[in-house]
Amino acid sequence: MIRRDSTGENASSLLIRGGHVIDPASDLDDLVDVLLREGKVAAINPDRKLQQSAVESFDARGLIVAPGFIDLHVHLRQPGQDYKETIATGSAAAAAGGFASICAMPNTIPVNDSPEITNWMQEPARGALVNVFPVAAATVESQGERLTNYAALRQAGAVAVTDDGRPVLADNIMEMALREARRVEFPVIQHAEDTRLTAGGTMNAGVVAFRLGLRGMSNRAEWSIVERDIELARQTDGHVHVAHLSTAEAMDAVRRGKRQGIHVTCEVTPHHFTLIDENVGDYDARYKMNPPLRSRADRDALIPGLRDGLIDAIATDHAPHATHEKEVEFERAAFGIIGLETALALAVSQLYVPGHVSLKRIVELLSTNPARILGFRDRGTLEPGAHADVTIFDPRRRWTFEAAHSRSKSRNTPFGGWKLTGRIVATIVGGKIVYQAES
Amino acid sequence: MRTAPPAAMRPSRKPLRSASHNASTKTAPRAHPHPGGLLGIEPLSLQEIMEILRQAARMQQSRPQQLLKDKRIALLFYEPSTRTRVSFEFAAKAMGAATTLVSAAASSIEKGESLIDTGYTLTALGADAIVMRHPSSGAPHLLARHVPIPVINAGDGMHEHPSQALLDAFTILQHKKKLDGLRIAMVGDIFHSRVVRSDVHLLTKAGAEVVLCGPQELVPELATSLAASVSITRELKHALEGADVIIALRIQKERLAGLQISLDEYIERYQIRPERLAWAKKGALLMHPGPIIRGLELTADVADAQQSVILDQVHNGVLVRMAILARALGAAKIAR
């Protein structure tokens, strides 16, 4: 697969040959070679001379070669909760999932509401295997009362703001956040949940929750905030990005907003386009997350949105938790599941294989659009000059995901034992192979 | 020379899993719940339900047999209870079992011991079955996935209270010969009631129709999704007219206050009084899972009326729980 030079190290140039390159950003969907050099894409379909200049080559025949995937929504748990994940282990899971870049959410301990923490997260000592882009808190300690310093945070390397885990609830605060964020070209990533309506809720409101004797979290709690945010985005000309969208109504609100030219974007998690509230079954907390798994009708409604571009991105909301935090009474169990290593496979198995979306669309959802949402011009694309972040995958390869083999520190996933189609073969970050599947 | 410690003291081959072990290689509980357990009515077939009731009837007819001699039954009560707990305790002792009560306040649960660890500990102490009441829906299901012994649900959050439904059915059958075709009205706080959920599952499986009655906040439309032949009415008269059985449910004053429902208005619209009882069929049964609050959901004279079988319910509870425990520990068959 890889010829290394005599030093045994990954050399600074790599030729990816024979792969089916899908790069929607440069309108490329063809069998071409890709030459990477010194951390950048040097050429597409390089001539013979350039080809021979490459020290290493990667045989990508039969595989898809895409711009490196970007996960807009990852919880790395550092600082403060190393026991369930670190930047090192989370990024290793990301690499195994084909993600060359991940956005690290700020609901750490302490909350990342400062340039100091934002900087700390990016230090090489953290051992990140892939690009880690911090998303900083939108308000101080994510309490929803006072804005943080967006300019300083941008300076420190943050790429967006959010109070994820919580909504920015107050109208005036959200309006100010959108205005200030616009000044520094940040999206405001909103965890859309009206927490006044969901108190005590642990799963989707509805027939299943009633039968199980659990308090529910209604669709309204999501769409009412999404509608409010879209209106505020209209008034402020700001960019609101809806995190982990899960309801048909919220999706419809996004559609209406986009039609009016409002700058609203949204992401959906693989578990929301795969699972439904009935999967909670006998109180299995592997199916407990926020927003909760929704009704079959809501899950089904997301599919056309994923197909036709209404939904911009797939993001995992990778949320590691220790066993002792999940294997407790359902009401007390922590919300969330890991997801970096199953994202591509679920997209291929649930969306591509049944014929709902094309591979090109999958690349848009996982790479092209996340880059666009974050304003990255030199990522999410393989045009010459872009960062040499490349994801190589086999859309036909069948495999079984074993939770025990996850590179995350945590094991909280409902997908253990699932037979999936679509496997990451290699992940390249800045021209260096950071993950390669055993053949 | 040192001899080996007795088998009971040797460490078991399977180590107790530590709560802090967060890199477990398994993501999900392994074991299937012990088939002798009783987590709810919903998963039971009508046949299984009737078998438990038949067993309870046998308990009533014969002298108590030592079906559970030398068995140890742990009563794990995370919520206070008099009726249910004493009922299970008497039931176990009547069959020769030893019981012990583990209540949250007076145990290491106060020190933060997890439910699963408590279950492992009780198992290692030699419990043959665990009867549990817990404020969280699904707690028994979690426990049952981790312990190798039967788990009997004595009430989990708002979810189910299977032994209550079984004793309700037993009581009805003492007076009505069959459940199929009966019209049963349930009045009160449906939303929060585990008794309602269990009763609805059982009664509809047996072919009865159930009418739920109360204000919107306590009886959401969603409740009709529980089972077929469940309907809702906001008018007490509609619920009670033609009813064969009326089950009054406890109302919590604090809950009404929290939902901003006027207590006086509630009493005016939904309290069961003698003249309202008269709307029901002649010989209709008046039931209540207890504890009753005279003057709230029902008047004192309704509680004490000829039609009231509330105390029969309590009495029958011991028999039904004897049947449940015998079934759990495989002793049911011996009783034939």
Image (cartoon, coloured by chain):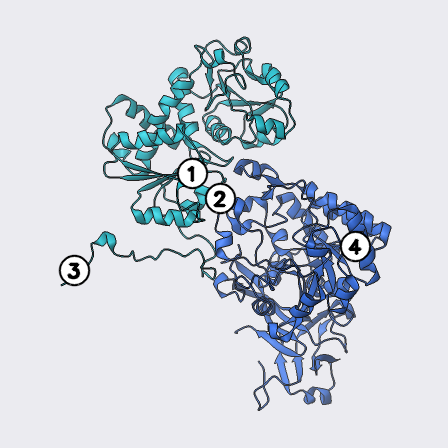
Chain colours: A blue, B cyan
**Same chain letter for marks 1 and 2:** no
* Labels 4 and 2: the sequence-earlier one: 4
Q: Secondary structure at mark 2?
A: loop
**Same chain letter for marks 1 and 4:** no
Q: Residue at x 56, y 68 (%)?
A: A89
Between A426 and A150, which is closer to the camera in this rendering? A150
Residue B279 visible: yes
Residue at the spot of label 3: B3
Q: Are marks 3 and 4 in contact (CB under 8 Å)?
A: no
x%, y% of residue A233?
82, 52
x%, y% of residue A422?
59, 64
Which mark, residue A282?
A: 2
Residue at the spot of label 1: B39
Q: Residues within 10 Å of mark 2 (few under 14, many from 20)?
A: some
The alpha-carbon separation of the residues under discs 3 and 2 comes to 46 Å
Q: Residues within 10 Å of mark 1 (few under 14, many from 20)?
A: many
x%, y% of residue A270?
62, 56
Q: Residue at x 58, y 70 (%)?
A: A88
Q: Amino acid at mark 3?
A: Thr
The alpha-carbon separation of the residues under discs 4 and 2 comes to 41 Å
The alpha-carbon separation of the residues under discs 1 and 4 comes to 49 Å
